[in-house]
Amino acid sequence: MNPFLGRHRWRSVVPAVAACLALAAVAGCGGRTAKSDPATPLPAQVTDALTDLVGSGLPAAQAVISGPEGTRTATAGTGYVEGSHFRIGSVTKSFVATVVLQLVGEGSVELEAPIEKYLPGVVQGNGNDGNRITVHQLLQHTSGLADFAPEDPSEKQPQQLDQMSDGKAYRDLGPADLVGIAMTMPPQFEPGAQFRYTNTNYVLLGMMVERLTGRPLATEISRRILDPLAMRDTYLPVPGETGLREPHPTGFHKVDGTWADITDIEAAWTGAAGAIVSTGPDLNRFTTALITGKLLPQAQLDLMKNTVPMTPDGAMAYGLGLIRLQLPCQNRTAEAWGHAGGIPGFSTLAVATPGGTAIAVSVNTEETNDHFSPALTAIVCAVA
C-alpha cells in the first residue's frame, strides 16, 4: 500500500537469469521483449522500459496508455493480457479521497473539522486526540498518527509480524480494529507538523464515509465513481474473496529468494487504504475523469491539488489523496497527477497529465528494484 517513491523500501532482486530460472517452473519466462499493438504502436521508450523491468528480474509488466490516439497496451514477461485485473494497492486512496471531497462539496463534511466530530471517541489514547486532527490532515497524511502496519519491520509490533504478506493475520479485523492497533502507539509528530504516509489515515476516512452515508464504502465508491464512469472491471473484494477475477496475471512475492505465487491473498481488510482491484483501461478512465473535473467541482479539485512536499526537491508532492509528479525528461519537465501503490503481488502507478494522457503501469510483484523508478519516469516522459 505504499506510494510510488514514498516510504517504499526498494528491495534487491536476483539477476535476470536466476529470476528466469526461478519463474520457469511457475509461469514460464518467455516474452521478455515488450510487445504492443502493431496498429497503434507506443513509443519505443515505453516498450524499452518494460523490457528493462523484466530483464532486471521482475516477473512481468504492463503499460496501458489512453489519450487522443485511443487506448494502447504494451506488455513484457508472461501473464498480462488485455483487460487483466490486478490489485492497485494505495491507488485506492484517490478513490476514497474523491468520495470525501464530494461529501465536502455537498456540505456533509468540513475539511477543517476534527475527526472527533464524525467519529467520536475513535481517535483517543496514548497521546492521540481526534479533537486535534482534521479531516484535511488525514487526507494529506499530516495527522501524525502511527501506521497500524509500519513499513519498517523494526517499527512493527510483535502481533503485526506474523503472516503479513498473505493478509491472514488481519483477515478477521475490521477498520475499527486496525485503528485500535494504531491507537496503541503514540503519535509520530504533532498534527500538521509534517508529511508522513500512514494507512491509518485512510482507514479512518473510510469509517467516516460509512458513518455519514449509512452505506458501505464499496457502495459509495460504486455509485459515485464506478457506475457513472462505467468502470465495470473495478471492484472492492468482499471478505473471503481471496482470488482475482479473470483474466489476471499471477502475483509474485519473494520467499527465501524464490518467486512464489501470492495471487490469492486476504486483501479485503485493507479497505480504504488499498483493497481495490482494477484494470489499466479502468484506471485511466478514473484518473482522466478526476483530473479533468468530471468527478469533482472545481473548488474541491483545487483543494485536492493543494500539495505538500514528499521529497526534498519537490519532484513529488502530496495533495488530498493525489500525488503530483514533476519528472525530469530530456529537455523539459513532465507533470502528472495520480497515485501509486504496492500490495503483496503487485505494484501500480496510475496518473494523468494536464494534456489528457492517462498512464497505468502494473508490475506483478511488490518487490521492485532500482530499475522501477527510472522505468516509470521513462514511460511517463515518452507519452506526456
Image (spheres, rainbow, N blue to C red):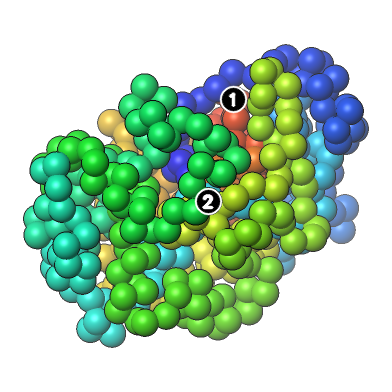
**Residue 166 place in picture, x, y as percent:** 60, 40
**Residue 62 place in picture, x, y as percent:** 72, 46
Q: Residue at x 46, y 65 (%)?
A: 95
Separation (CA) of disc 1 from disc 2:
29 Å
Name the amino acid, label 1: Asn
Q: Looking at the image, which is closer to me, 338 or 162?
A: 162
Q: Secondary structure at mark 1?
A: loop
Q: Which residue is mark 2?
A: 171
Q: Which residue is mark 1?
A: 369
Name the amino acid, label 2: Arg
**Residue 353 place in picture, x, y as percent:** 50, 57
Q: Quadrant of residue 193?
A: top left
Q: Residue at x 30, y 69 (%)?
A: 208
Query: Callout 1: 10 Å neighbours few (<14), some, many (20+)?
Result: some
Residue 207 visible in the current orientation: yes
Query: In screen coordinates, is 141 left or right of 369?
Result: left
